[in-house]
């Protein structure tokens, strides 16, 4: 399998070398004749672009020059090339990087980590023994002994090794391939290009050609071109491991898969490991194989050699198989078990490759169907099936990689949150929950949010909408609610959800205390006992409502916004101080919870309690008539309450929004 072309990295190194040669005047970061020094600038530019916000370093920009002097350690650097201080609320995280413009062995990488950690240990314990350049740079930060456990160490090199024996959780290895992916500045959904070689010639079948009148073969543009072959298990393992640490939250080899690979603790791992160890040649017959979707492929058999080139591709079925092969190879390599590596080379995997590009008619529909129909071994939910739709991917990128605040939407099961940009707890949400919150908040339709959860991602076959009217109203890229709202507006919606959950805990504890105090009273009078029993039942009813009124409570808050926001100047520029909420400063959190409870939560409970009668509350909330009564009573209250509620809401905004 051929290595990815690194020409663009070399070109960027040369560009920055020519721009920053002999910079700065003192303590040169890029020395004359030392082109490798510029590789540190490339790594800083790519690896930390989401922190410093600079897409391309430019010598003519004073800010760029200043920031390099702030974070790049000039030679001699004490084995640390980049020391980056990340402010995270009232804490700090320190990214410590050694850069090598060469291929490193596992032993070399391990030594790099040892040297970096030793340099930090010396600075903390005997700073006078630290090299001058490193000491001066760190001295301008807040770094001290209290942050010794807040360090992340990176080794960046141009080789392919991205894991070592006994690697610690705070040690990251970044390869040149990984930099190429990060350089794109977005979550790449496929592997750009790879070459595969198999020793047996003519070990492939290319389908879907039609004969032209002169006998020449021509591609049928109505159906995908396909290739059937046997890929080496060793090549697939190397491919998995090559992209395993892309730092983008997932392995891009499975970028268009409907689900992530299963846990390594799965029994499937053990059974496949056993097959490789005992019957490697029979793996092909025991395994269902993998399916790849690509924009192009080329297969040529020459001199008993077979070369297959695949472009812009993703494994859409077989993530479990491929990741298991990768885990087997990784274990064998770190333990230097050459016999196991040889066994892996005897493994072959049946591989189907489909060519889907814009030349193919209805390519989007065919692509989606292939992904869905190739994932039928484990039942797929309708949410699984929409995870590859363009509007889901576009929404994820809009909210996470677009304007701030950054929000990460999980559009498929098993996704990991990328390490940056940083997100607060409420800014991580599934597309399903986000859809429900949008329905009860932005649309003030609590019944739809509560009742239609299982239908949001279902297709009803109508051609004039995406999937179904509710889905179209939310996710249509042209006029869908979630695309017309700003990140700030969606951030507030998610924060209100978090605020509701925290206020619910406050409410439940308050009601529990009421129950306890009332139950402990010693009463002998029959009338008083009856009154206490009624009071206890009322409190229990309030607790029951508080537990299940989420969508109605959020609808209540947004109804107040709709009625009273016009009374507040520049309301669109105001937002909750979420950092202060999580930091716990000035009792902001406790005060906000108490105010939200008094203004919104208690009113929600009151309306439901007064109108649901004696029937089961959950049934009443699930009945569209109950929701209609709730919204009607809420509107009547907001309209007829005079200035009292309006003033309370305005005071609430002035106190808690900035």
Image (spheres, rainbow, N blue to C red):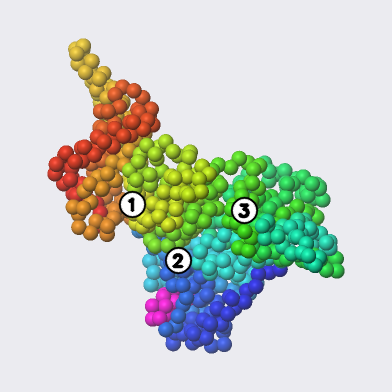
In reply to whether residue 69 is colored magenta, the answer given is yes
Left or right side of 331 for 263? left
Q: What stretch of residues is rendered in magenta?
A: 61-73
Return the x and y of residue 71 as percentages of the image width and height: 44, 73
Looking at the image, which is closer to me, 470 or 173? 470
Label 1, label 3: how many angstroms apart (C-alpha)? 38 Å
Q: Nearer the viewer, mark 2 or mark 3?
A: 3
Which residue appears at 71% of the width and 68% of the height? Answer: 2
Q: Up-down: is 609 above or below 354?
A: above
What residue occupies the far right of the structure in this picture?
Answer: 303
Q: Which residue is mark 3?
A: 366
Q: Which residue is mark 1?
A: 492
Q: Which residue is mark 2?
A: 50
What crowding class fits label 2: few (fewer than 14 Cα within 10 Å), some (14-19), or many (20 or more)?
some
Looking at the image, which is closer to me, 106 or 48? 48
- For marks 1 and 2 on the same chain, the one whose residue lies earlier in the sequence: 2
**Can residue 277 be seen?**
no
What crowding class fits label 1: few (fewer than 14 Cα within 10 Å), some (14-19), or many (20 or more)?
some
């Amino acid at each position: 399998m051929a290595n990815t072309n690194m020409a663009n990295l070399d070109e960027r190194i040369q560009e920055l070398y020519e721009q920053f040669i002999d910079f700065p005047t003192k303590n040169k970061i890029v020395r004359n004749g030392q082109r490798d020094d510029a590789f540190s600038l490339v790594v800083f530019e790519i690896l930390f672009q989401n922190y410093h916000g600079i897409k391309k370093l430019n010598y003519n920009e004073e800010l760029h020059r200043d920031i390099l002097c702030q974070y790049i350690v000039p030679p001699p650097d004490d084995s640390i090339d980049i020391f980056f201080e990340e402010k995270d609320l009232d804490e700090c995280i320190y990214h410590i990087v050694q850069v090598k413009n060469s291929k490193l062995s596992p032993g070399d990488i391990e030594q790099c980590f040892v040297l970096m950690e030793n340099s930090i240990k010396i600075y903390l314990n005997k700073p006078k023994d630290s090299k001058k350049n490193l000491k001066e740079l760190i001295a301008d930060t807040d770094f001290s002994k209290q942050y010794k456990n807040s360090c992340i160490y990176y080794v960046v090199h141009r080789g392919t090794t991205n894991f070592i024996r006994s690697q610690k959780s705070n040690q990251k290895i970044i390869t040149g391939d990984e930099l190429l992916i990060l350089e794109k500045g977005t979550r790449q959904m496929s592997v750009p290009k790879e070459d595969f070689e198999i020793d047996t010639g003519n070990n492939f079948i290319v389908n879907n050609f039609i004969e032209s009148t002169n006998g020449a073969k021509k591609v049928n543009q109505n159906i995908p071109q396909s290739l059937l072959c046997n890929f080496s298990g060793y090549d697939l393992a190397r491919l998995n491991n090559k992209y395993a640490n892309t730092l983008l939250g997932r392995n891009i080899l499975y970028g268009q898969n409907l689900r992530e690979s299963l846990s390594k603790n799965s029994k499937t791992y053990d059974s496949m490991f056993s097959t490789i160890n005992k019957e490697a040649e029979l793996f092909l017959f025991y395994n269902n194989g993998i399916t790849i979707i690509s924009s192009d492929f080329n297969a040529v058999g020459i001199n008993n050699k077979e070369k297959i080139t695949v472009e812009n591709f993703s494994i859409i079925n077989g993530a479990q198989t491929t990741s298991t092969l990768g885990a087997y190879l990784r274990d064998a390599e770190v333990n230097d078990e050459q016999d196991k590596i040889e066994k892996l080379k005897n493994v072959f995997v049946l591989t189907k490759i489909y060519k889907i590009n814009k030349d193919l008619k209805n390519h989007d529909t065919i692509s989606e169907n292939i992904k869905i129909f190739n994932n039928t071994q484990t039942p797929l939910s309708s949410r699984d099936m929409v995870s590859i739709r363009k509007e889901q991917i576009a929404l994820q990128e809009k909210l996470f990689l677009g304007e701030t605040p950054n929000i990460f939407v999980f559009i498929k099961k098993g996704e990991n949150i990328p390490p940056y940009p940083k997100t607060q707890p409420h800014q991580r949400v599934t597309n399903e929950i986000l859809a429900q919150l949008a329905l009860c908040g932005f649309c003030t339709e609590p019944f739809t949010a509560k009742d239609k959860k299982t239908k949001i991602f279902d297709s009803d076959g109508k051609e004039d909408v995406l999937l179904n009217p509710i889905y179209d109203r939310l996710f249509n890229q042209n006029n869908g609610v979630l695309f017309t709202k700003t990140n700030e507006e969606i951030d507030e919606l998610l924060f209100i959800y978090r605020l509701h959950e925290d206020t619910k805990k406050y409410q439940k504890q308050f009601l529990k205390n009421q129950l306890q105090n009332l139950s402990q009273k010693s009463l002998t009078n029959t009338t008083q006992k009856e009154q206490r029993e009624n009071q206890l039942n009322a409190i229990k009813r309030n607790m029951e409502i508080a537990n299940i009124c989420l969508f109605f409570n959020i609808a209540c808050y947004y109804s107040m916004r709709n009625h009273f926001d016009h009374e507040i100047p520049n309301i669109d520029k105001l937002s909750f101080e979420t950092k202060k909420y999580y930091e716990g400063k000035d009792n902001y959190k406790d005060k906000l919870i108490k105010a939200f409870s008094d203004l919104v939560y208690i009113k929600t409970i009151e309306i439901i309690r007064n109108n649901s009668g004696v029937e089961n509350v959950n049934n009443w909330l699930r009945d569209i008539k109950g929701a209609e009564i709730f919204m009607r009573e809420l509107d009547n209250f907001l309209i007829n309450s005079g200035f009292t509620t309006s003033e309370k809401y305005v005071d609430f905004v002035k106190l808690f929004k900035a």
